[in-house]
Amino acid sequence: MIISQDDQALLDKKGISAEQFAEQLKTFKTGFPFLKIEAAATPEKGVLCPSSEEVEEYIQKWAAFCEKKQTVLKFVPASGAASRMFKDLFSFLSAEYNVPTNDFEKKFFDNIEKFAFYADLDTTCQKNYSATIKELVAAGKYKEVVSSLLDADGMNYGALPKGLLKFHNYGNDARTALEEHLVEGALYAAADGKVKLHFTVSTDHRELFKALVAECKPAYEEKFGVEYEISFSEQKPSTDTVAADANNEPFRDNGELLFRPGGHGALIENLNDIDADIIFIKNIDNVVPDRLKDDTVTYKKLLAGILVSLQEQAFEYLRLIDSGKYTHEQIEEMIRFVQQKLQCRHEEIKHMEDCELVLYLRKKLNRPMRVCGMVKNVGEPGGGPFFAYNPDGSVSLQILESSQIDMNNAEAKSMFENGTHFNPVDLVCAVKDYNGEKFNLPAFVDKNTGFISHKSKSGRELKAMELPGLWNGAMSDWSTIFVEVPLITFNPVKTVNDLLRDVHQ
């Protein structure tokens, strides 16, 4: 297609090349291929279930690592607005009735005093309507209470990101989700007295995040005896993807090309900009109050201990390969390590010539590594752990979403449905080589693992393209290890009423 001067100016502004633009349009026509899977990963094969003795051993490994003045960082995707948390309350505001009618609405009002934001909401109602929440409810003015919570002239919770919302009560105090991550960071990601955290945020909310950090950081530094280094970044415009119409031509809004954010897979670029030896990744809304943090801390340290143990062994083998002074027995040992510990197999390995075999082993050892917590599947929507075929013919562990699997293939569908575990986004990553040099993370992305969804804009249908997900295709060519973690470590807040669950009280 011919690119106009205005089109080119927009591409230049975003940092998207004409080649990238053409490739995206071509993908709308060809689609993304489904991944070929071998089996679901289970505790019998593919998901580690360490004994209590092993847990203690790995926790000690992590403690020893943190004493080596290594750089540890906690990376928290936090850009999403909380509007979906309040979808049911927005529906109530626009409903024809004025009193709580369905179960969700009744539960919200029946338990309103249990929310950590209750005191702030009460103050806002008094400011806006000269009445307390109780007085408004007694007068049947339920919608005034909800509008005080959600609207811009109230607390504006309907437009704020989850990280800035008050999640948990502590007597006369309350903590936001962001503050809970500061506390977590001090408990398992402190190294050399420093706690580094990085939040990916939207442009609109960056200053609000910075203001909250400036306000609360000194108190947490004093409480935990640490020094926080907190940084922020935004999704890069260069990772946006063009939208297409039904004919796979560029979708235009008032004549201008329409671009959309590329999904959380775009954050591989933000992750790539981080300079740290070990990086914890966890979603902003998966936090619990202090009384339940012990399990979270224990299993985070476990994952990290497994990671640094495996990385240490991989580095030892890489130094041996690069020295050229290795024996046949040592090569056999490396094969077993890659197959059994890193869970990566290749049917053709027995047919490889010596030189080809060593190059293959070096490639599998010399790449980013991640250890991922997996919880037992209790019906949550989302991805899970599988053995999947890679472009080079090897089979390795991958986190897969249903959109990546051909559900018209009965065998593949059965494998997906029989998966025993679920991905709670609980990762610990090692992103440097044995010389301490950073890997270039975009080089390890499988570009064939994005997906196309159907949306609408101004009443017109459009096709949107999501980049390979951050913990899916964006980390496809990493060494991946899965470890079972208890369900108590997974407590996402999808709706405001989730904050009423016991784990958030």
Image: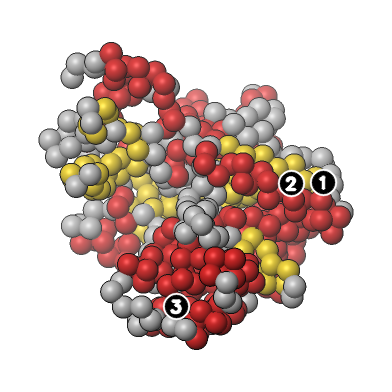
Residue indicated by mark 1:
227
User: Considering only vertical position in the picture, is 230 above or below 259?
Assistant: below
Tag 2: residue type? Ala
User: Considering only vertical position in the picture, is 26 above or below 488?
Assistant: above
* Label 1: which secondary element: strand
Question: Which label lies toward us, 3 or 2?
Answer: 3
Q: Quadrant of the C terminus?
A: bottom right
Report the disc number at residue 108: none
Identify the image's colour scheme: rainbow, by chain, secondary structure or one colour. secondary structure
The x, y position of residue 78, in whole percent, is: 54, 49
* Label 2: which secondary element: helix
Within 10 angstroms of label 3, few (less than 14), some, or many (20 or more) residues? some
Residue 245 appears in view: yes
Residue 79 horizontal side relative to residue 389, left or right: right
Residue indicated by mark 3:
141
Which residue sits at x=54%, y=65%? 128
User: Considering only vertical position in the picture, is 37 above or below 477?
Assistant: below
**Cβ atoms under marks 3 and 2 closer than 8 Å:** no
> Which residue is nearer to you in this view: 64 or 221?
221
Residue indicated by mark 2:
214
* Label 3: which secondary element: loop
> Which residue is nearer to you in this view: 365 or 255?
255
Which residue sits at x=43%, y=58%? 83
The x, y position of residue 6, in whole percent, is: 29, 17
